[in-house]
Image: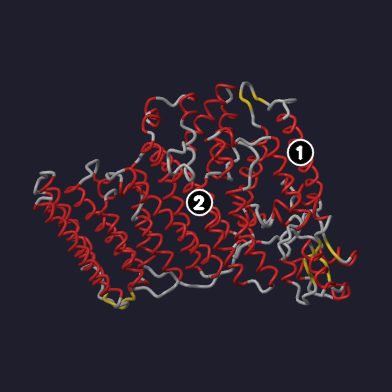
Amino acid sequence: MNYLQLAILVYIIGMMAADFIILYYLLRRPIVNKKAIFFVSSVLLYMSVEAVDISYILFSHGSIIIEPISLIIASIPIILSTMMKNSITRWREDKTSALTLALTIVADEIAMGYAYSEAFGPHINPLIDSVSNIAFGVMMLADSIFFLALSPRKIEELALFTFASSMAFMPNIFFTFSAYTELVGSLIASIIMIVNIITLYLIESRKLTFNAQLLSISLGFFDFVMMLSLSIYATSKDLYTISLTMIASMVWYFTLVLYRFKDVKIKLSLKYPLLFVIFINFAELTMGFGETVLGFRITNDLWMPSMMSMHSKSMDPMHMHMLMWSPTSNPWWWIFPTDPWSMTLMAYKKAMMATHNILFAGFWASYMLIMMTTMMPFYVVMMGAEMSYLVYERFKTAKNSNVKSWAVAILVGIPLFVWLLPYYTPTYIFGMSGMLSHINPAFAPTLLSLTLSLVAIALASTLFGKRAYCNLVCMAAHMWTNIYYDQFKPKKSIKIWEYIRWISLSIMIIVFTYVFLIYLGIAKNPSIGTLQIPLLDFYGMFTLNYVWWFFFFLTPVFGTYSCARQGWCGFGNFVGLFNKILFKIKADSVDTCKSCKTVQCESACPVKIPIRTDVLSKGYTNRISCVGCGDCVEACPYNNLEIIDIRNAFRSEKARTS
């Protein structure tokens, strides 16, 4: 480091210190002269343009004529202040004052980033240089800590802090460092953003004010935009999009921090949760996609560079096939087993070669893109972490001990099932067994493993009812049985869905029967043109990834457990048949149900089962659509309902022996 570089570094640190002193003064004085805000803005701009001018002249040998021009531009706020009346104002409630200061701070941050890049690099173009360097990341982290320290301890402030600090670790910040550092930084950014998304869920579920809705929905949108830019960067190393996205996100962050929107209560209409759920889910999908692509390419490039060099030489299907799976020599193989983008491109090319139909090729590529993104371990872990916390929040608020214990079972059951048990088909990589089959063919699923998996699920469902699958280990248990999504229970059901249930169950039985014939060598997978369609993969993934995710994205519209209520999940209907063996939701007193005026059990049921009708006719309900969530048991004001399964037999035996 030479003297000029050291001088620029000292200047940047001095600018940051001056910014914090000025902002500290302003934040402690909410009522000031409006002219003072414009004066402060010009002071900050003077420091900014000096940073740009000095670094440009010293390191790029620019003309000194830029100095007077930039000083005139920096003087615009103070010139405007001379034209306005002398007025005292609550500057954080005044749009002009707060937004002027927010834009000034953003310009200040960009100027400091530019000054650092002129001295230390990178040297691509002024926009990218200003944002994609370590100094910019340090400034964003310092800003987020500064504003958090001066703010009241509210969950909204934590949401703003995590939103800003995640930008400090985006991969473009570290792209001049080693690839490994870039990956670690990106993972830290995603971990912080996971915390941010959890805080936004909690704000949405607790705060019915305009401020809270604006903050959660807008940050959800910018989370999505940032993760989309991460995905573009991961696939193409495009620095423009991610740099512009970070600048736009900064502007909105400082706007939310400095300007106080009117905090009025609002009615919870459909548009607020619908927008929030859509933005958050797109943010999660793009985060899972971007991190997996980036992680796969960087880790495999580090541990097997000769193979990854083919990325730059060829993208034809034969070479792409060699890039699909990480070897066990890569210590990150278990979290980044494959590259969803490469597999999507390969799927499109194969479909085009086989059918010469661009519409089908587009569908097949989108199917592969969504499937490989949502099946990736990173995405599953990310979603599991978010939803587990929300299930924990549901556990804390539950009043019934049965519901509390079942919430704990979900928290334990989902990770065990996702990582250890599924053993259906090579492409189904939710479980470790599925991933291992790509590393070592000896672990490839067989007819025996498929049969044992079905038998295990059938046995568990016989003993505990459909809840053993649909409300314990299916991802729907995480996604819908939690403190946020639980509020979207539907108001009613439609009779026609009972008929749809039997159609989807019949399709599932036909598919599984045909798959058994394929394993036995009697039949072959169907094909379109020369493209073979792996039947079990396609059926399972189309149901879980296309249909299920469509309904999950639109939960505020369709309600929770639409898969069980509307009956389009054939496997769920198959499991539901076992509700008829031991499982029941039984009433202790039928007379109590007969005299009940509230029927809160049916209001609480996410599947909208006519519980009271069933109880009055036979004393219990055990329909195949029941997911066994226990909401009806908890909602009953008379504590008159209980869940009956194999455990009750042991309790009865224990009671007899004692």
Residue at the image point whose x is 71% and y is 43% from the top: 452
Q: Secondary structure at mark 2?
A: helix
Give the quarter of the image for residue 29: bottom left
Q: Secondary structure at mark 1?
A: helix
Count neighbours of disc 2 (C-alpha within 10 A) and say few if under 14, some if 14 to 19, many if 20 or more.
many
Residue at the far right: name it: 617
Reply above or below: 607 against 130: below
Q: Position of residue 241 (x, y in %)?
A: 37, 44
Q: Is residue 86 left or right of residue 93?
A: left
Q: Position of residue 86 (x, y in %)?
A: 25, 75
Q: Position of residue 186 (x, y in %)?
A: 38, 50
| Tag 2 residue | 284
Give the quarter of the image for residue 77: bottom left
Question: What number is the disc on residue 453?
Answer: none
Q: Is residue 105 left or right of residue 513?
A: left
Measured Cα–Cα span from mark 2 to mark 1:
31 Å
| Tag 1 residue | 507
Reply above or below: 205 against 416: below
Give the quarter of the image for residue 653: bottom right
In front here: 403 or 243? 403
Residue at the image point whose x is 29% and y is 50% from the top: 131
Which mark sits nearer the N-terminus, 2 or 1? 2
Q: Are marks 2 and 1 in contact (CB under 8 Å)?
A: no
Q: Quadrant of the C terminus?
A: bottom right
Q: Amino acid at mark 1?
A: Ile
In front here: 648 or 295? 648
The coloring applied to the image is secondary structure
Reply above or below: 190 against 256: above
Q: Is residue 125 left or right of residue 530?
A: left
In front here: 565 or 51? 565
